[in-house]
Image (cartoon, rainbow, N blue to C red):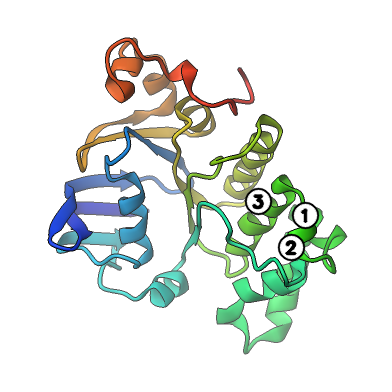
């Protein structure tokens, strides 16, 4: 579905990504993990068009997208859910959803039909349609953010730290909503600091370190490795000490 080939990208004069090679399978949930500064979120920014690679290529179903603007990347089928604060608090849930459908604004009938489909898949969209986003709970806001990313029917959704700052109950909402997106046929690529949560949710796991892909394998195999703690957090650390959020813990 997505392939990164020798991607180097960064900020200012330096490269955070040091020649990343990565393949994301169609309809998979792939979770990128690794220590702070490994380049995880930079991969998402390069994919979404917010950061243009200095070298290398990024393709979506074989089509190069690394030179596209963020709007063109979205139109090509890649949507991103930011870490936090993605909703306009003073707007209603419906208006926030309409913002997500900006590219469809000239086809109002198709947009209404899509919003109805998403309200069926995520009932809170219909139930809280006229309420301001600022009045929603943390879990409800996350659901609206996820649903809004789906308005344009993307083939890929990028999730940047979806459980950041959330309590365990809301993490379960993230787990369920991500699974629901994937059930709808969407390929999900996520960056997650809560290693056990992310790899439990994912079908595929990727470990990054110092701007490179260290390991890419099925998430279940990555979870079963004996060297998980040392790999991510240094000798003696263990991924089970990460913040709560694993629904199967």
Q: Is residue 117 above or below residue 103?
A: above
Few, some or many residues within 10 Å of mark 3 (<14, 14–19, 20+):
many
Q: Earlier in the sequence, mark 3 or mark 2?
A: 2
Q: Is residue 198 above or below residue 100?
A: above
Kindly state the secondary structure of the residue where label 1 is placed.
Answer: loop
Q: Quadrant of the C terminus?
A: top right
Q: CA distance from mark 3 to mark 1?
A: 9 Å
Looking at the rendered image, the disc whose residue lies closer to the viewer, 3 or 1, is 1
Quarter where residue 100 is shown: bottom right
Kindly state the secondary structure of the residue where label 3 is placed.
Answer: helix
Kindly state the secondary structure of the residue where label 2 is placed.
Answer: helix
Few, some or many residues within 10 Å of mark 2 (<14, 14–19, 20+):
many
Q: Position of residue 110 (x, y in %)?
A: 69, 79
Does any portion of residue 52 appear in the rendered image?
yes
Identify the residue at image location x=59%, y=80%: 102
Seen as rendered, the residue at the extreme bottom is: 106
Q: Earlier in the sequence, mark 3 or mark 1?
A: 1
Quarter where residue 57 is shown: bottom left
Please name the residue that numbered disc 2 is placed on.
133
Q: CA distance from mark 3 to mark 2?
A: 10 Å
Q: Position of residue 216 (x, y in %)?
A: 29, 33
- The image's mark for residue 142 is 3
Q: Relative to residue 47, is residue 133 drawn left or right?
A: right
Looking at the rendered image, the disc whose residue lies closer to the viewer, 3 or 2, is 2
């Amino acid at each position: 579905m997505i392939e990164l080939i020798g991607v180097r990208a960064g900020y200012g004069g330096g490269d955070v990504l040091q020649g990343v090679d990565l393949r994301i399978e169609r309809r998979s949930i792939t979770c990128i993990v690794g220590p702070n500064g490994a380049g995880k979120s930079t991969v998402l920014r390069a994919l979404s068009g917010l950061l243009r690679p200095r070298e290398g290529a990024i393709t979506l179903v074989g089509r190069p997208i690394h030179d596209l603007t963020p709007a063109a990347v979205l139109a090509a089928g890649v949507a991103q859910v930011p870490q936090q604060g993605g909703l306009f608090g003073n707007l209603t849930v419906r208006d926030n959803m309409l913002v997500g459908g900006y590219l469809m604004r000239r086809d109002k009938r198709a947009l209404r039909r899509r919003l109805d489909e998403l309200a069926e898949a995520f009932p809170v969209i219909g139930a809280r349609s006229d309420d301001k986003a600022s009045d929603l709970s943390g879990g409800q806001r996350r659901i609206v953010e996820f649903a809004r990313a789906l308005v344009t029917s993307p083939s890929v959704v990028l999730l940047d730290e979806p459980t950041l700052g959330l309590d365990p109950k809301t993490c379960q909402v993230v787990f369920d909503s991500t699974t629901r997106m994937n059930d709808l046929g969407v390929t999900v690529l996520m960056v997650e600091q809560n290693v056990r949560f992310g790899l439990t949710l994912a079908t595929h796991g990727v470990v990054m370190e110092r701007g490179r892909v260290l390991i890419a394998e099925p998430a279940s195999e990555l979870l079963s490795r004996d060297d998980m703690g040392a790999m991510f957090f240094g000798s003696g650390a263990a991924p089970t000490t990460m913040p709560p959020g694993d629904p199967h813990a």
